[in-house]
Amino acid sequence: MQIVEMMILPLIISSVISALAQVRARDARQIGIVTVIYYMTTTFLSTFTGIILVSSIHPGDPALIHALGEGTLENTALSTLDTFLDQIRNMFPENIIQATFQQVQTYYVPIKPKVQRMNATANFTEVILQKPQLTYTNEMNVLGLIVFCSGFGVILSILGDQARLMINFFIVLDAIIMRWISALMW
């Protein structure tokens, strides 16, 4: 299984670059538009289906979850905006080499409050403040690699005959990787 996992990175790079380098820029734009529409449609449908199912099935017993006090995300400040911004950061990595083995993720670090608040009953309550920080997790940034390789392939396509040697290199590399994967499957 590790051998197949080892082939993921070369397969993504060679396949995306060689495919887009062989397509005209206008066709690549149309393929990109259709891909974005398809992605948005399937995302909307899966979200809609999830909301319908959660509303109708009510997974988990709310009384049990409340009694145990576990499974809640009250202490986590992570929001949809953080997740969305992480996706944007991962689409355009700072270092393409680092993107082959790490991706960005936001997490929150508690910071000590400078002032304690006192409520009407003279009890002190401590306000937990959290500060967002970016960290790198040890996972391949596939999204960033696909965006980079897509841009690289489209530029090769635009350059045409000037980049013929590089295009041929990625076509042959793709054929080698596909042959290797076929041999590993048998």
Image (cartoon, helix red, strand yellow):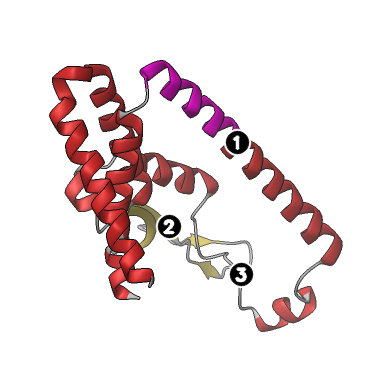
The magenta-colored residue range is 24-38
Q: Give residue 151's position: percent from left, percent from top.
A: 30, 30
Q: Does the magenta stretch include residue 37?
A: yes
Label at residue 72: 3
Q: Is residue 56 magenta?
A: no
Is disc 3 placed on a helix, strand or loop?
loop
Identified by mark 3, the residue type is: Thr
Identified by mark 2, the residue type is: Leu
Q: Can residue 135 be seen in this view?
A: no
Is disc 1 placed on a helix, strand or loop?
helix
Which corner quadrant of the image does residue 71 belong to?
bottom right
Q: Give residue 18's position: percent from left, percent from top.
A: 29, 37
* Residue that carries the numbered disc 2 in the rendered image: 129
Mark earlier in primary sequence (1, 3) = 1
Q: Give residue 53's position: percent from left, percent from top.
A: 79, 59
Q: In this view, does 136 lie to the left or right of 44?
A: left
Q: Give residue 33's position: percent from left, percent from top.
A: 52, 25
Which corner quadrant of the image does residue 145 belong to?
top left
Instruction: Please tell me whether residue 70 is drawn above or below residue 154 in the rendered image.
Output: below
Which corner quadrant of the image does residue 25 belong to?
top left
Q: Residue at x 29, y 37 (%)?
A: 17
